[in-house]
Amino acid sequence: MGQRKTWSKKMNSHPDMTPVLGGLKDFQRTTVDYVFDRFYGQHDPTSRFLVADEVGLGKTLVARGVIARTINHLWRKVDRIDIVYVCSNADIARQNVRRLSIPGFEIAAQSTRLTLLPLHLGDLQKTKVNFVALTPATSFEQTGGGGRIDERAVLYWLLDQAWGIHGSRAALYVLQDYATTASFERAIHALDRSSINQQIAADFVARLANQIREEQGAGKPDLRQRFDDLKRNFSRVDSRPGDEATKRRTRWIGELRRLLARVCIGALSPDIIVLDEFQRFKHLLEEESEAGELARHLFESNDQEGAKVLLLSATPYRGLSYHHEKDENHYADFISLLQFLENADVTGCKQILAEYSSALPAANTPAGLSRLRIAKDALETRLRRVMARTERSSVEGTNRRMLIDAPSPGASLGSVDVSAFLGAQQIADVLKHGDMVEYWKSAPYLLNFMDLYALKTALENAVDNRDIIRLVRTYPETFLDLDRARNYQELEPANPRLRGLLEETINQGMWRLLWMPPAISYYALSGPFAMVGAGKLTKRLVFSSWHMVPRAVASLLSYEAERRMMRANDPRAELKRDDWTKQRGLLRFNVSEGRLTGLPLFLFVYPCVTFARDCDPRELARGASLTAEEVISTLKSRVANLVEHLSIDHEVSGPVDERWYWLAPMLLDFRSCPEIARAWWETDDLPQVWAGAETAAEDEAWSRHVSEAQATISALADGSLRLGLPPADLPEVLAFAACAAPATAALRAFVRASRSDGRDCSPLLLPAAQTGRAFLSLFNHAEVTEMLRAEFSTGPYWVRVLQYCHAGCLQATLDEYSHLLREALGCSDDLPLAMAEKMAAELIEALTLRTASLRVDEITAPPYARELTRSIHESTVVLDV
């Protein structure tokens, strides 16, 4: 099976897994210990196990704990420890492979394709512990396609080792597939053939020769013969061999990719395989498919200790079927899963299930109840060998309820809802489709949001059906009125559940909140955060088995939130969606007529160490219950005292000098922590490293702003510049910045999360500064601008943003979020800088999230029309802020 693993640099010291295991909750550690005992214990161990903990209980952390204990167990037994993580999405794979990695081995974590393993196996052999992330679509489902250009470049050099094809233009034309000759040649030359693992190369050559012998023995055209035929078809760069030859070329490359995938699986030889949310690719557990066969080779590839397969899923199988799920067999799915976990015949378990089922009707009699309990105990004993589940109710104390059944008071049925159902049902009847009740109960405007449903396809094919046209006219409530949406007018929910969700979220004022209020605020929240009863707010998780529901719910809720935000300043204004797209953000580092317009924004992006230390709202909250106004009053006095002690020579009359706003925090740092301040401003390429990932359009303007700040500070230091009169509201504005300016708040949060010494937080300044810049993106959305203008009626926009951050206690929000990220990112044992960088990356990604555009079908039948008209419009909806 798998080849013997080697490791070139032995590590003598045994790794300390205490921090990983010590960070687990009690119930998580219990699960880890149980799984490990089932894998490596003395009593009837298993090689496959399912952790089916309820959503949100940390299955990834459990998997990390199992990995830690496995490393401990295998450290002296094997030369190299490989962990393979499989999930459905490449982005999730890249993210979670970092979360699963163990401190000290992060550098070995990588996400790749199975067929690119020849380029990475050399790296794997350099480290004792390796984490490799794979996805089914890119590694196991080796279709007949030609794959990526880098995969074909690997195949090119492997075939050169087998057949000596280098230098043959025809061979190059064959392997380039649909890529251009120039791009494929670049890929070939960019790939260092010496980096290809020679063991995999030798195995591939041997497997290739063996397959050719088998094909020749069966009297079939072999791979080499078909390659020579293709070379004749593609002998010149301008060859036009036709579609059939082109398809044969792609299928031939696909065969080679599958062959290489099988070789790579044999080389990987994992010790533990984690299948995350495996139900999304459960076909890998079935050997009938080619993907399943490849996966089976992976599961059985380790011939030393034996690969352990850990399955993770909150919903591994369904316990019942609804009447509209006639084509689904959940019992068969469960049996299939159990057969994989036990890797054996499950007839005995089927008999126990049959006994349990037959005993249920007689459970109201003593004999029947006894029989049922025996079957229940037998079933539990059988299933606990290969699976475990923890539910929220089992980890809560007996005096607290974690789950409360609270029906939505706003989920009322209206006449519009009934009319919408009647229209949809009558259209379904005309098109000879079934009952619409389950659809109608789940989402409004079914026919607008359906996509790839049989009913929708039938409607599209019936645009000239007179009965359909009549019904569309008779029941307009069934269809979304996109003309109203284009003009930011209110839309009818047309569904009791959506109406209830609107009542619990949007109608409670959540559209005014750009982040969820902190669980524990350092002072009483104010402004929009106080008016919505922040203590009662929570997130909502919507479950549905219908594909149209996420589109409908996301579109309509986001539209209503955006509509209210855009109309916050003037509810009666005439607005169109074009007004939204035309607006540009106000928080930008621009140059207008030679004047730098973004200098005040340094309050947002410069992490002031003095403010972070001396004006911490958390410290004010100790032993006191303060209002937001009291916090600002206290900080206003403190900031005024700090600025006064700067002793800056300035004018006492004349025009106000607004440079005070952004200069004061920088000058305070030069006074209280000069070494940190000098190191910051003397950083090489400061504008570039400060900006991080920035748009090219702002690069020059941003650099000019940073240069202006540096020049102004230098001029003040050498006495060549005298500031003008300070603004009257300077202490108050700086108090808001000291309390809640994004970069400063992020600096405090990173210091706390990393348990750093606050006196020397210089390593954390850059992640905090980059986080502060990301907040500008959030406040530059058109709808956010309109909402904040309505919330705070005076002062420039950037001051209103600071007031909003203070009203929502941004500091407590970032403190709580950073605390959660320590666990979620698996970075609790990292050095402070590494931890802050990971947290900043998550924050920046969330703050700069791009909105999604969902397609909504407009369905109308105007009275003057001879047929049903159907046009497609793109409606941009904010899925997350």
Image: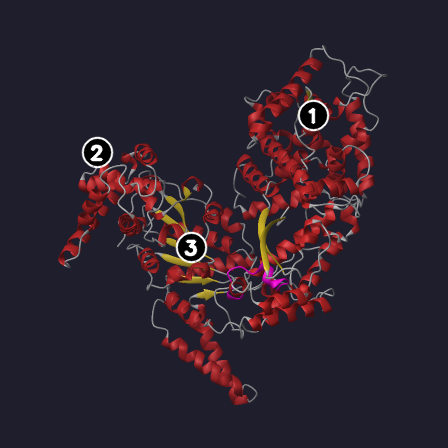
**CA gap, disc 2 to disc 1?**
60 Å
Q: Is residue 117 visible?
A: yes
The region drawn magenta spans 443-455
- Residue 571 percent across, percent down from the top left: 79, 48
**CA gap, disc 3 to disc 1?**
50 Å
Q: Secondary structure at mark 2?
A: loop
Q: Which residue is mark 3?
A: 274
As rendered, which of 97 and 872 lies closer to the eye?
A: 872
- Residue 422 percent across, percent down from the top left: 65, 71
Question: Identity of the amino acid at label 1?
Answer: Leu
Question: Identity of the amino acid at label 3?
Answer: Val
Q: Earlier in the sequence, mark 3 or mark 2?
A: 2
| Badge number at residue 314 | none
Determine whether, in the image, residue 764 is placed left or right of residue 488.
left
Q: Is residue 414 visible?
A: no
Q: Are marks 3 and 2 in contact (CB under 8 Å)?
A: no
Q: Residue at x 67, y 45 (%)?
A: 577
Q: Secondary structure at mark 3?
A: strand
Q: Are marks 3 and 1 in contact (CB under 8 Å)?
A: no
Q: Earlier in the sequence, mark 2 or mark 1?
A: 2
Q: Which residue is mark 2?
A: 167
Mark 1 Cα shell of 10 Å, populated few (<14), some (14-19), many (≥20): many
Q: Which residue is mark 1?
A: 599
Identify the image quadrant of residue 757. top right
Q: Is residue 263 magenta?
A: no
Mark whose residue sits in front, 3 or 2: 2
